[in-house]
Amino acid sequence: MRVYHQTVLKRLFSVIFLIALLTLSGCSKEPETLQKETINSQSAAAVSGTSDIAGMQANAIDLSKDYHSFSNPEEVLVRHISLDLEANFDRKQLIGRATLSFHRKNPSATQLVLDTRDLNIDSVTYASSSEADDIKALTFSLGVTDPELGTPLIVNLPADANHVSIRYQTSPQASGVQWLSPAQTAGKRHPFLFTQAQAVHARSFIPLQDSPQVRVTFDATIRTPKELLAVMSAANNPDTERDGVYEFTMPQAIPSYLIALAIGDLAFEPMGERTGVYAEPELLQAAAKEFEDTESMLIATEEKYGPYSWDRYDLLILPPSFPFGGMENPRLSFITPTVIAGDKSLVSLIAHELAHSWSGNTISNATWRDLWLNEGFTTYLTYRIMEMIYGTDRYKMEAVLGYQDLQADIESLDEQDQIMAIDLRGRNPDDVFSNIPYEKGALFLREIEHKIGRDNFDDFLLQYFQDFAFQSITTDDFLEYADKTLLADYSDLLTRARFEEWIFAPGIPRSAPVPDSDAFAIIDEARRAWLNDDVQTSSIETSNWTVHEWLYFLNNLPLELSLSQLNALDETFALTQSKNNEIAHSWLMIAVRNQYEAAYERLYDYLVSIGRNKLVKPLYRELAKTEEGKAFARRAFAQARLGYHPLTIKANEVFLE
């Protein structure tokens, strides 16, 4: 970071010198314009590796290389995976075989390199003919283990091999698999298993080329206790017999991070002709009611952005330890139960995971540097879907809240992490997840929409989704495509330099669109009047407030509030007891910042009952700012740890050291 800040200072002095020089020579450009063009030129140079920024962010980056995979798809490309796995809940292991079919891009290649993490490899074999007993052992070795990326598996290939079969066992501590006891489920009777492969955790339960550049089809046979049901990110049959052996196929080629498995006491409820929900029986009806608009979302998105390519779109409601709001596993999105609010107020999450069926699943980022291509486009589509289904007022409110989330991240992140095409070399790819690829990416697309018109931008998106269907692309692929489409068709409105400023420079570019909402103007006035003691707490008219208005009211209160103010809010609106997990989160953040002990019992219960990282991480981070808070956080974390996903544990234990 010290070198980085020195680079920024050098660049600043260079800008000042250029302004002075051009002013003395009679230059008519305004300093602000010159500064913007300097930033843009530096961004452009960063791509070609010729500027100071290049030394920080893009110097020597091989844009086609995935720095988070040991695999060698440029030599030997895996195209299909066949799984035969037993889920052993007593040992907390997946045990079985993965057969990988591949194509030698280099005909003389003699090794297949795969990614693994904490896998016990029993054997590697291949069949040199169709004879059942013609199975030959292959020699293999494990390379040096990297603490973030795992261990390469190097298989020596005979000349006639076009597939290998690997027998293996996962570790009980596999980073991408969580085994839950019956007590950690809604029903309390049966255990539960789910996987979470993004970003590089598929390698912890399958030996494979764990890179989003590599797209594979797969089939699977999953063996479970007979009382449990298995589902996957594949073709699921809602009427399948519960017999302990389940077979799946995924005919479309997908990146490894979208391979997903869940096993539990699951039931199914249809929500439409192509949509339905899997959940534990205790949650099923509430989930089906909450998400009943999913079919309408699917139809509206198809009408705007082209046919849905994945047959069915179903949801799986996971136990509360799931570390994310949702995961866009194709055909079967994994969803946290924390968004079952009873009033559809948090269903933008469903719109987001559905939108991934176009941006992210059909078109995927080729490396984790390019995550904004997944999440920026998907977040933009989310807002559009919400507007189509729930109206412009809700769209505007959610856009304002998203923009405020983006501003908060920009204030807290180092400048290098505010860049959409982020340099992740030498880092855990999970570090890419912030509001930068999501909200900054969506804001960039919203600016294009504003400049060329919504209908024109929709036409572009429709063609973009068609032209790159079932491909993984880089940021630079997108820019080359934009050169031939957007930048060529609207050269009077759009510039390559502005695109590069959005993608390669930190922060939010000047003159970026800022969302607004008339509904929030009313909330601002109510908050101001209350803070100025112009109205009593009981006089604030909240009967018609939506969840979004409550979040805007709470999130924009001053950081410091008096005990009397906190008591008044809590006694009037029962915020400590709110059943809406997002409202509760905002209120508990206020309680921690102001050491409002009346909410601490709820805070403790909240931390130990929810594993969604978006909700618990800010609370742990805020608690850790004081010794008393850190001691409280340690007690809650110690109890919650057994139920947390490994990703949630890793993200939060750093605050408690």
Image (tube, grey):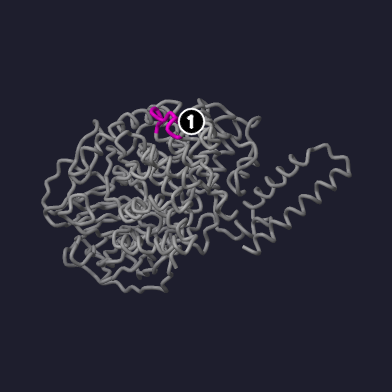
Q: Amino acid at mark 1?
A: Lys
Residue nearest the observer in this picture, 228 or 529: 529
With 507 as the anchor, is 64 left or right in this view?
A: left
Note whether residue 203 is visible: no
Foreground residue among 589 and 491 = 589
Q: Residue 649 location in percent, x, y?
A: 37, 61
Say whether residue 475 is left or right of residue 54: left
Q: Is residue 443 above or below residue 453?
A: below
Mark 1, secondary structure of its residue: helix
Pinpoint residue 568: horizontal percent, then vertical percent: 43, 40
Residue 242 belongs to the span the image colors magenta: no
* Residue sitting at x 69%, y 47%: 39
Above or below 141: residue 93: above
Residue 238: where, in percent of width, then height?
18, 41
Mark 1 neighbour class, 10 Å CA radius: few under 14, some 14 to 19, many 20 or more:
many
Above or below, 424 relative to 133: above
Q: Is residue 542 magenta?
A: yes
Magenta segment boundaries in residue numbering: 537-546
- Dominant SS of magenta comes to loop
How far from the left and from the top, in percent, is residue 329? Answer: 33, 47
Say which residue appears at 62% left-offset and 44% top-offset: 500
The residue beneath circle 1 is 396
Q: Left or right: 159 with respect to 405? A: left
